[in-house]
Image (spheres, rainbow, N blue to C red):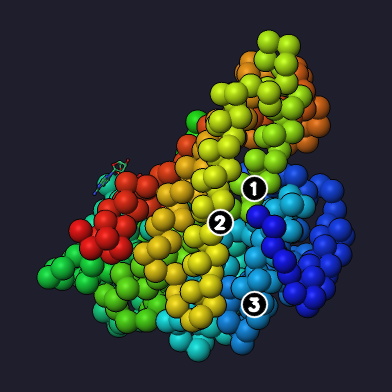
């Protein structure tokens, strides 16, 4: 979409481009999945130095104070330069909960360390049997007799990058007898170094180690680490989920993905002609672009509502469904375009430090793992079926 920017926005875009020009090549053109922990932290620190870690935060806590147009420019330019995204768990998930519902002490303790990247956070919501039905979480948090600590027992699962985390935010059951399940849940911040925590890897279909099981055995957590009121955690958790879903749309990055896909298709041949000449292929790309443009308009409407002071509401479910399906179609079409060159499969470990393709063109490298990895997008952040339920109830009033 071509946008006519005001002169001050063009000046801002120049500033963004000047900064992005300074990003070292090893941090460009790689997905978050392909970056090591150090690589992710290096990117975070560069942004911190620039003061651009948290465009969504209020200025008093370290946000950038950008206008909606500036946020849009930042998204577009960072996708065009193919720099990594900032890990969402600290900056976009737990931080909004802390600055909205936390105590002054919690804000002072945690927010600066999230901004600087000193603390790596992970999300402890899901449990075996409690994914879509999140309100059924069973991990127990029992108050000690002196009322100073909770003792946590149970298991969290699918914990993304928990193997690197310094802190985990958890939904725990503090009142097993509450009249409604949602009313017995609290939101607790847990230091991952606390004795009794064990992290075990789950290896996914793309061969990567991105998710984990996290076990808690008599883990002692100070009550000061509870956010807000006891048994009110569900209210805070829901705020976090709508923030999580807005970020998931990934419009600017999908636009870059479409551009890349077109470049690949121009080089791949079908019956001696570039794939881009094939009518069926053209139809698929056109449909993808139409859906992406529609999503972009929806995202811009959401951003406009946010800048007018309305937090992300149930509309974020629309962004989540459409954005995640587009990401899946993109990786599927990339595999289709490169055909059998996607077969030489390289897992995460082999990709690290790999700089040439064993067979076929470089752009085919990693297309299979990327395809397998994006199967997750319609599951995490609340599965797309659940998002459809939310739209039916909250938007359509069914
Ligand atoms: C790669 C990955 C990373 C993740 N990272 C994290 C993380 O960091 N932290 C975290 O807490 N969680 C994480 N998750 C967990 C994720 O949020 C859950 O997988 C998701 O909420 C689905 O829950 P479930 O896996 O228990 O599936 P289930 O809830 O058992 O669902 C199974 C199927 O049934 C469908 N279904 C269930 N209920 C309904 C209903 N009422 N109506 C219609 N259909 C329904 C679902 O859509 C799904 O297709 C991650 C998941 C993945 C795959």
> Looking at this rendering, what residue extends furthest in the top direction?
271
Does residue 273 show up? yes
Q: Residue at x 85, y 53 (%)?
A: 24
Q: Is residue 268 above or below residue 96?
A: above
Name the element at disc 2. helix
Q: Quadrant of the C terminus?
A: bottom left
Q: Quadrant of the N terminus?
A: bottom right
Q: Position of residue 114 (x, y in %)?
A: 61, 71
Q: Residue at x 73, y 16 (%)?
A: 273
The quadrant where residue 43 appears: bottom right
Label 2, label 3: how far apart the Cα atoms are: 17 Å
Does residue 161 show up? no
Q: Who comes first in sequence, dot 1 or dot 2?
A: 1
Residue under pointer 1: 255
Q: Is residue 23 above or below residue 372?
A: below
Dot label at residue 67: 3
Residue under pointer 2: 296
Q: Is residue 135 left or right of residue 9?
A: left
The reply to whether callout 1 and callout 2 are in contact (CB within 8 Å) is yes
Q: Is the C-beta of the residue carrying label 2 under 8 Å from the nearest atom of ligand 1? A: no
**Front in this rendered view, residue 393 or 396:** 396
Q: Position of residue 223 (x, y in %)?
A: 38, 79
Q: Is residue 270 left or right of residue 133?
A: right
Q: Position of residue 94 (x, y in %)?
A: 49, 69
**Front in this rendered view, residue 310 or 118:** 310
């Amino acid at each position: 979409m071509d946008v006519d920017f005001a002169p001050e926005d063009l000046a801002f875009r120049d500033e963004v481009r000047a900064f992005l020009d300074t990003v070292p090549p090893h941090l460009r053109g790689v997905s978050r999945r392909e970056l090591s922990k150090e690589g992710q932290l290096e990117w975070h620190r560069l942004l911190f130095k620039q003061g651009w870690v948290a465009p969504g935060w209020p200025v008093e806590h370290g946000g950038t104070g950008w206008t909606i147009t500036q946020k849009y420019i930042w998204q577009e330019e960072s996708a065009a330069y193919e720099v990594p995204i900032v890990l969402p768990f600290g900056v976009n998930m737990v931080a909004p909960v802390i600055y909205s519902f936390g105590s002054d002490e919690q804000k002072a303790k945690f927010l600066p360390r999230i901004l600087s990247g000193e603390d790596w956070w992970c999300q402890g919501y899901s449990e075996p049997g409690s994914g879509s039905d999140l309100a059924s979480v069973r991990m127990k948090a029992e108050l000690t007799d002196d009322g100073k600590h909770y003792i946590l027992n149970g298991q969290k699962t699918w914990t993304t990058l928990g193997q690197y985390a310094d802190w985990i935010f958890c939904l725990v059951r503090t009142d097993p007898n509450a009249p409604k399940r949602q009313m017995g849940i609290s939101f607790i911040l847990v230091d991952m170094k606390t004795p009794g925590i064990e992290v075990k890897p789950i290896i996914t279909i793309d061969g990567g180690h991105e998710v984990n099981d996290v076990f808690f055995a008599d883990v002692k957590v100070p009550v000061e680490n509870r956010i807000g009121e006891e048994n009110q955690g569900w209210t805070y958790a829901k705020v976090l989920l709508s923030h999580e879903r807005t970020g998931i749309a990934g419009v600017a990055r999908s636009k870059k993905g479409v551009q890349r896909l077109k470049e690949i298709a121009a080089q791949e041949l079908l019956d001696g002609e570039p794939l881009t000449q094939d009518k069926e292929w053209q139809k698929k790309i056109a449909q993808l672009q139409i859906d992406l443009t529609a999503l972009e308009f929806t995202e811009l409407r959401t951003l406009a509502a946010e800048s007018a002071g309305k937090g992300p509401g149930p509309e974020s479910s629309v962004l989540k469904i459409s954005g995640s399906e587009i990401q899946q179609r993109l990786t599927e079409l990339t595999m289709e375009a490169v055909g059998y060159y996607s077969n030489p499969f390289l897992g995460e470990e082999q990709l690290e430090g790999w700089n040439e393709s064993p067979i076929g063109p470089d752009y085919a490298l990693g297309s299979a793992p990327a395809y397998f990895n994006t199967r997750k997008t319609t599951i995490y952040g609340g599965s797309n079926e659940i998002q459809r339920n939310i739209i039916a109830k909250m938007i359509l009033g069914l």
